Amino acid sequence: MVYSAPIALFIGHRPQLTQKILDAIAQVNPQTLLIFANGAPSPEIEDKCQQTRELIQQIDGKTEVSTHLCDSYLDPSQKMATALNWIFSQVEEVVILEETCYPSLSFFAFCERLLTDYRQDERITHINGIKGHQQPSVLEHSYDFSLYPHYLGWATWKRVWQHYDSQLKQWPQVYDLELIKGMFVDPQEQKYWTRQLKANVNEQLKDGTLAWNLASWSQHGVAITPSVDLVYGLETEEYPSFYPTVPQRSEPFIQGNQFTLNHPNYVLPNQTSDRHIFSQLLAADTTFSLYQELEEKREELEQTHLKEQQQVIESQYHSVYSKTSELTEQLQQGQAIVEAMESSKFWKIRQRWIRLKEAILTSPLFSTQMSVREQFKANARNRETPPHLSVVSPLTGSPSVTLLERMPAQKLIDDWKLHTQLDITEELKGHPEICLYQCDQTKLNFFAPLDTVGSGNLYAQLDQFEWYYSSEKWEYSLALQDLSGCTNVLEVGSGFGFFIEKAQEQGITITGLELNDHAVKVAEEKQLPVKPIDLQNVAENYPESYDAVCSFQVLEHVSNPKDFIRWSVEVLKPGGKLILGVPNAHSFLKHQYCLLDMPPHHMTQWSAETFKSLENLFPIKLTKVKIEPLADCHVTGYLTSYRDYWCSVSPLGKFVFSEPAMSYYETVLKKGLRKWFPGQTLYVEFEKIG
């Protein structure tokens, strides 16, 4: 005869055990066999995995075989979820076995009969292959019912799987509804299963069977349990110690060629058997008693703490009440004094002066007008904490950060369209606002969310502007002096290759990296050694290969500066130089509303203090810090940024930065005084240690 119930077999890396169970399955001639093969947990046993899978080819051709072969190893929780999802995409009910167990012929007949008998009975969610405890059976019937599903050979239906939540997303609702308390009368059982499920949710425990238990309990379902064990374990370490490991000497329920069952009259859990099962669970879990003791101590401490808090609150209440009475008395005395003063001539003159002063200060002449940057700072001070979860420093990974500014994303989008005719809507990924934070440890300013970093499409549009890639930069001349004697140099972010041209003129062997396709094409047309390769690739394949690494106006563009610096250091030889040029966060830029100094263009803002802190994060030593003198082209921006700032914070700003005053300042600065004021660029040099 053909066995009608689909059988699913979980296999892994035990070819000898798999052969035994395949022989047992062959005895019942199944119509459908589903084989789920897990991957190897380590490279050393991949050969055994392959040997186990090769046994599938020996299965009788009359059986319809389906396979799911995993490319990698799945832990018990992942395996359970993946296997059940695959199985119930193909069948409505199934008998499930593992390679580490061995079923009797009665097990197959038992499951086949009861899968049919209880197919439409929503009360039954699971068919066990074992009774689940070591006590002698005293049942009058062939089986009874239990709250406990077991997994040493079992069977179930797709209707139960539809309630299966492998990630236990429904746990908070189950906990609030006190489902566990409703299923188990014993407080110890309630605490045990609540702890187990919490541990699984928090990924402290990876047990796929707990999610199936909850699927059964959430429907107030019970499991069918045979009066005798029909399956036994072939490897004891795979199962709890109370699971059967010795086969039955006879086939229960089978007399001759007849299979008979004595059915129970009621569908109720056998509480006596379930108590035996739970006592064995507690014996196997040596940590639970300690956990329970700790819980009781914690509750006792909480009660003591609550009593102490109540006493403190009562004491504070009496103290506040006493002080309130004193203040009420003082207020009454003060009111009497005020009434006496208001009737005096001096008081009336003083009131007139106060009104005059208020009129002067509220006049347009003395009013202040908040700049855009100061409004962003006010947003950070006055509004609720932004909804960014787990904001951490991109340098240290520490959550110790301070919120500095909050800017509406729509304003950035509108202003980019107005000033550059570029639409950055997609670059900002739908975030309602962009925030500027400061790392408390390194003083690095960084923008969040980090996924607003500019795409290649943005830079392809920007390099169409003539002003975007400048052939002359203040830091170029400093770098060329510092690279004297270096024979092999790497520049990261070469753009059109302007610095490479200057370095080659000095006889320096230099290679450039650039990810902007258009910029690479322009550099190649000039026959410059600029490659479209990322820095990580160079670090992995050419460690300690360069005398110097330099990068100008690039570091502030990356959202992960830690990796950028780490890879730069890795490609340096010991004693090699790391040269960086970035916008100076302590220059006039800190007051200027500059679209190019915020996302999606710039992601970080650097200061000399921040660069000094890198000595604690990387094997480098800061050897040089230079600040660009205020450039002639930046004089107007310098003055307007400070004008906007002082007009935001003080009425005197309108006088100090009036139009005549601004014109005078600009003339003086452009005649040479600007050289004594800090400009836009910060230049630093590091030496790799060891």
Image (tube, rainbow, N blue to C red):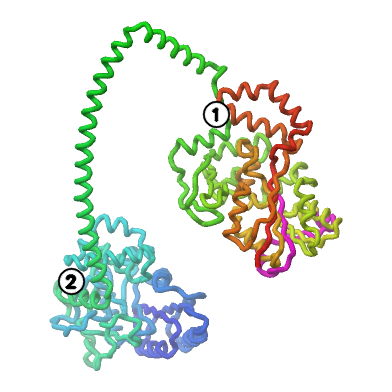
Residue type indicated by callout 2? Pro
Task: Give the residue number, with chain letter if any, for mark 2.
Answer: 269
Q: Secondary structure at mark 2?
A: loop
Using residue 454 as the reference point, say whether residue 476 is left or right of it: right
- Residue 672 image offset from top left, x and y in percent: 78, 33
- Is-magenta flag for residue 151? no
- On the image, which quarter does residue 156 sit in? bottom left
Marks 1/2 in contact by CB < 8 Å: the verdict is no
| Residue at 59% in and 26% down | 647
| Residue at 24% in and 93% down | 249
- Residue 306 image offset from top left, x and y in percent: 21, 51
| Residue at 19% in and 37% down | 318
Q: Nearer the viewer, residue 61 or 554?
A: 554
- Residue 91 image offset from top left, x and y in percent: 38, 72
Q: Nearer the viewer, residue 58 or 479?
A: 479
Q: Nearer the viewer, residue 615 or 436?
A: 615
Gap between marks 1 and 2 measured at Cα: 76 Å
| Residue 570 appears in view | yes
Q: Quadrant of the C terminus?
A: bottom right
Residue type indicated by callout 1? Val
Which stretch is magenta?
523-552
- Is-magenta flag for residue 531? yes
- Residue 25 image offset from top left, x and y in percent: 37, 86
Q: Nearer the viewer, mark 1 or mark 2?
A: 1
Using residue 353 as the reference point, say whether residue 140 is left or right of it: left
The answer to whether 43 is drawn above or below residue 121 in the figure is below
Task: Give the residue number, with chain letter if any, for mark 1.
Answer: 649
Q: Quadrant of the N terminus?
A: bottom left
Q: Nearer the viewer, residue 11 or 117?
A: 11
